[in-house]
Image (cartoon, rainbow, N blue to C red):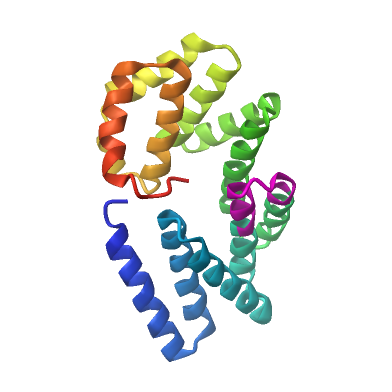
Amino acid sequence: PEHLAERVKIAAELGELAHRQGHPTALLRASQTQIETMLERGDMDAFEAALTNMESLAERIREPYYRWHAKAVRGTQALIFGQTALAERCAREALELGARFGEETARHMFCTQMVGLMQMQGRLAEVEPLAREMMLLHAGVRGWVARVGVIDGLLGRRDQARRCLGEIMARGLDWRHREPFALSGLCTVADLCGVVRDVKAAAELYDALLPHAEHYGL
């Protein structure tokens, strides 16, 4: 996240180069990069423009990966705007599309979206197995470890939730410079901190998140 301004500039340059080439795959890759950076900035108009471009191009050339990606991102957009029924429908349709090129990536995205959606709706009995599945598959990713801790806390298992946060904080926050989804990971750990109401951890997390106050941590 500390390189967001640089990534925005690179995404714009990729778009210019792709349009100059006119090659469909280059245009799709440029759109993908723009979607990621604009979402993190909270620039939803630019995000919508890049997503619409990806959708139309992916459908025209019948490119399976980007058809899946566009559908999955539509689900994310719906979740952001509180359109829960649309978010769930897009997530399930994306999972079906993803089966055509690789189940693991599509499954990860599906679980990410459904865990967020189900937690928001209070469907904790449904969300727990999905979160634990992802934590086991991606054991080194702090965001999934913390998400299971959040669910433990919401289900009344406060001691387990506190222990989870304690273990994460005891190892320090340097992982945020190495993990690919550092900002979302920090936000999830902050979620866990809120559930267990740990004042000391809150101060450390606040300092870690403060440089990214203008970012959208999904």
Query: Which one is in front, 190 or 46?
Result: 46
| Magenta residue check for 85 | yes
| Magenta residue check for 204 | no
What is the x, y in percent for residue 145?
46, 29
Q: Residue at x 64, y 45 (%)?
A: 82
Count the marks.
0
Q: Residue at x 72, y 50 (%)?
A: 92
Give the quarter of the image for residue 94: bottom right
Residue 141 in view of the camera: no
Is residue 88 found left or right of 187 in the rendered image?
right
Give the quarter of the image for residue 205: top left
Residue 65 in view of the camera: yes
Q: Residue at x 57, y 43 (%)?
A: 112
Whether 207 is drawn above or below 45: the answer is: above
What is the x, y in percent for residue 90?
70, 54
Q: Which residues are magenta?
A: 74-88
What is the x, y in percent for residue 4?
32, 58
